[in-house]
Each structure stands twice: as structure tokens, then as C-alpha cells.
Amino acid sequence: MEWKVTQESLPQLAVDGVVVLHTEGGKTVREDARAVDEVLDFRISRLIADGEITGKYGEITLLHTWDKIPAKRVFVLGMGKEKELDVDRLRNGLAAVARKAVERGLKHLGIALPESLAEGKNASDLVQAAVEGVELGAYTYEGYKEENKEASLSTVFLSLSGLSPSGADAGLVRGRVFARATNLARTWVNEPANLLTPAALAERAADVAKRHGLEVEILDENRLEEMNMGALLAVSRGSENPPRMIVLSYIGAPESKEVLGLVGKGITFDSGGIQVKPAKSMNRMKEDMAGAAAVIAAMEGIGSLKPHSNVVAVVPTCENLVDGRGFRPGDVIRSFSGKTIEIENTDAEGRLILADALAYARRLGATRLVDVATLTGAVVVALGREVTGLMTNDASWGEEVKISARLAGERVWELPLVQEYEEWLRSSVADLRNHGGISEAGAIQGAMFLKQFVGETPWVHLDIAGTTYSRKARGIHSEGGTGVGVRTLIQLAIRFAGH
Ligand code: BES
Ligand code: ZN
Ligand code: ZN
């Protein structure tokens, strides 16, 4: 998709459709739409006066222009009440319009960001949100159907009468990078597990590294054996597809010792292992690598924006299948950290591979950590599908991640780490066990286990089991993978530049 910033007004644009914004309660259209309204003999105003167009947030009204302007269609997008208008609404609203435009086969779209919208807001943020909205809303997963894929938008004109051009440029660059990285993660999450194996995921990561000149190291099974990554190896043993530990490094501040460590759970399929999941719960388990996808895709964004910070991404990836060679409940394994772990449940595999990855990220010099993982069904019960669970051992680092999430338009909510629950993880035969054997506070239990592998390093755990996929297309989300976490992590790496 190509973007063109223009000072031309909407009626002049040679496009298939134009988008105007309308706020609730406004008697007439906003200034950007007035020119369009005028050439349409004030039809938009009349529809508003008659109550057909209300401006309620999310309302999209499609009008034809009967050759009065080059664009054949006008989308009037309801933005809700003026005082509730923010960048999240802009992003989601434009995403919904973009999706409609793609469904109708439109190729060229014109959008006006009106001057009044910019009041008290930063031009760069507005443009970033608008660009993200359109790119995220226009996303479709191609899949493997024989028939031709849906056509997509090819050019979008952004008409910016009242916004500063330099701010607009910065927003355009960021918006494009944030959205495209998110879409990349979505595609990987949507890929089937027979095609996106651990080795294939490692190849995608290597492609990212090549595109942006990042350092890449991919540890294969032999290397993992040599390095005693016993937890990752134990989980992977039941699969014919060998595991990988993927490491991508971006050095943007060579003079600094601070390194942001990003760790993502990359289970390409989770059957539960010998303690196999019920059939229904297994259906979406190709998505159990969404944390890995978020981290690798964030490196794509970081590699293109090149912030003044150092970032190392560590992604453990394997399959959790059922096989005679697989690990069993009661097994004791030795993790990379040296700590031994008794297996209480083979379905609590994510925390095992993350244990090795977190310890390895610290070995590689990470001074602050964030892990992203589809870790527990319990977090879905606690927070549902709109909010990611956040847990941390360091309140100010937690705050930093929360701020990044807010700026990125992603919702997180903190759950506490509860010291008393740590005793559930005690084992009589090993240093730890991977589950307490009771179902209470499942999301926190998972985090308490991970905490054993981060030492004193400030660390945030994001449990994205609920937010990783969307049942239906709505706002910025298409059906399927959401790419959750990607924009938060890129934003965090940009903010980390101050360290
Ligand atoms: N991959 C699952 C968690 C999950 C659940 C992700 C639902 C997405 C949607 C994880 O490996 C798992 O199986 N967790 C178990 C832990 C339990 C056995 C301690 C769970 O949540 O049931
Ligand atoms: Zn599992
Ligand atoms: Zn899992």
C-alpha cells in the first residue's frame, strides 16, 4: 500500500472513494467534508438533519456521488462525541472503513484529517493512528486457496490541510512500520502448524535479520544439547520437527550497557503432550507461537526505525506433541539455568521453554526483560479477550511497559505476583515443579514460575492467551491473529532509547 500526503481537498482526488469524519450531535459536516457535501448538493447535511447519519462511533454510511466528483463513493465515518474523540477511535474507525473498502474492491482511497481534529493533539500521533488503522483494517490473510486472493488497497491519499507536514511525515513512517510489523505477526499466527514449523519460524526470523542488518543466531538441536537447554529439549522431544532457539540482536546504542531483552513463547502447536488436551481446547493451538511472532515482528519494526537502544530477542520454539519419546509427568529435567524441574503437567510447557530463554537472555546481557506468551487459559477467564495480563517483579519497569501499551493502543491490566503462591511450585525431588497441581490463580502461578529464572533483572510478563486472536473482524482486528504485543514492544524499544 502506497501513501501520499496531499494538500488537495477531497473532491479533487482521483480515487475510488473518499472518507469524511462526522461527530455525534454536529448539525452539519466538519470542515473537511464541507467541500464534498457542497458538490453533492448538501446531501450529507440533509441526511444528518433527517437523522439518517447520527455520527455515533463506528457508524459507516456509504453514499454514491453520481459523477459529481472523481471519487464514486463517500464513506461518512461516525466518530462519536467530539470530546471522546481520541487516537484509538481514529485508528479503529478508519480500520473499519478500510475493511469495507477492501471488501468492495476499492483500490484508491482519499482520507481527510480535519484541522479541528488536531486541536490539542500531536500531528504525528494523529497521522500514525490513521495510517495504522487503514493498514491494519485492510489486512487479509492470503492462506492457501486456489482462487485469486482479494484485491487490496493500493494507494491512500491523506489530505492534511491543517496539520504540520513534518509531524505528518514522522507519523506516516511510524504508522506504516507499526502496522506492517503487526500484520507480519498476524500472518505467522494464522499460518498452519504443519507449514510453520520451528525451523520455518527460524527462517522467517532470519529473513527479518537480513532485511535490517540484525545479528542472528539460530541454535539447532545439537547446539541446544551442547548448551544444556534441557527444558526446551524436553518439551520438543515428542515431535519429529526439531526445536530451535532464535536470537536476533539489534545494537542501536553501542556505548550503552543497557539491553532490552524480548522473549516470546514459540510453541508452533500445543497438543498438551502426554497429558493431552481435550479435542476442543486443542483447536486453536497453532496460535501458541503468538508471543514468538510478536517478538520477531517487533524486531522487524525496530530494525526499520532504528531507535537509539540495544535490543536482544530470544525466541524458544518447538512443538508439544504426543509421542512415545515425549516427556512425561514425573520426569525431572535440568534447565539451562541449572535449576531442576519436576514435570507436574506436560501441558504447562510454555513456562519450561521460557525458563531456558529468559536465563539465556540474561546470559546474553539483557538488563531488562519482557516476555510475551500465550501462557494460560486462566488469564482468559480473568481478563477475557480484550485485555492482556501483565505481571512484573519491578513496579517502575511495569509502569514503563504500561505506558508503551497505552501509547500503542493495546490494553493491559496488572495482576499481582503473590509470594505466598510460590510454595505451590515446590517439589520433593527437584528445585521446582512446573505447576502446583491446583487450578487457582493459574495466570499468577505461571508468572511465579517464570520469576524463578529472571533473578534480580527487572522483568515484565505479558500473558496474551486471551488477546492473541479475534473471533471476528472488528475495528483494527481482522478475524484470526491480532498481532497483539507488536506495537507495545516497538514503542517500548523507542522509549528505551533514553536509558
Ligand atoms: N497454550 C496453553 C495456554 C492457552 C490456553 C493459550 C488457551 C491460548 C488459549 C498453555 O500451554 C496451557 O496449556 N496451559 C494450561 C496450563 C495448565 C496445564 C497448568 C492451561 O492454561 O490450561
Ligand atoms: Zn500447554
Ligand atoms: Zn501452550
Image (cartoon, rainbow, N blue to C red):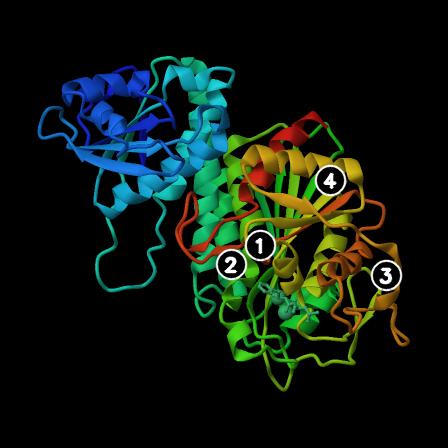
- Asked whether the beta carbons under mark 1 and mark 2 sit within 8 Å of each other, the answer is yes
Q: Please tell me which residue is depicted at 57% across the width and 57% down the height of the picture.
A: 466
On screen, residue 348 versus residue 489, left or right, reads right
- Asked whether the beta carbons under mark 4 and mark 3 sit within 8 Å of each other, the answer is no
- Asked whether the beta carbons under mark 1 and mark 4 sit within 8 Å of each other, the answer is no
Q: Amino acid at mark 4?
A: Gly
Residue 152 in sight here: no
Which sits earlier in the primary sequence, circle 4 or circle 3? 4
Residue 105 in sight here: yes
Q: Which residue does the numbered mark 1 point to in the structure image?
A: 292
Q: Amino acid at mark 3?
A: Glu
Q: Secondary structure at mark 3?
A: helix
Q: Which residue does the numbered mark 3 point to in the structure image?
A: 422
- In the image shown, does 394 or 315 lie closer to the viewer? 394
Which sits earlier in the primary sequence, circle 1 or circle 2? 2
Q: Is 282 drawn above or below residue 496 in the view shown?
A: below
Q: Is 428 drawn above or below residue 141 in the view shown?
A: below
Which sits earlier in the primary sequence, circle 3 or circle 2? 2
- In the image shown, does 420 or 458 lie closer to the viewer? 420
Q: Residues within 10 Å of mark 2 (few under 14, many from 20)?
A: many
Q: Please tell me which residue is depicted at 76% across the width and 75% down the height of the picture.
A: 343
- Residue 117 image point, x, y percent: 42, 20
Q: Is 27 drawn above or below residue 293 in the view shown?
A: above
Quarter of the displayed picture in which ligand 3 can be seen: bottom right
Q: Residues within 10 Å of mark 1 (few under 14, many from 20)?
A: many
Q: Quadrant of the N terminus?
A: top left
Q: Amino acid at mark 2?
A: Leu
Q: Amino acid at mark 1?
A: Ala
* Residue situated furthest left in the rendering: 67
Q: Residues within 10 Å of mark 4 (few under 14, many from 20)?
A: many
- Residue 180 image point, x, y percent: 43, 41
Q: Which residue does the numbered mark 2 point to in the structure image?
A: 201
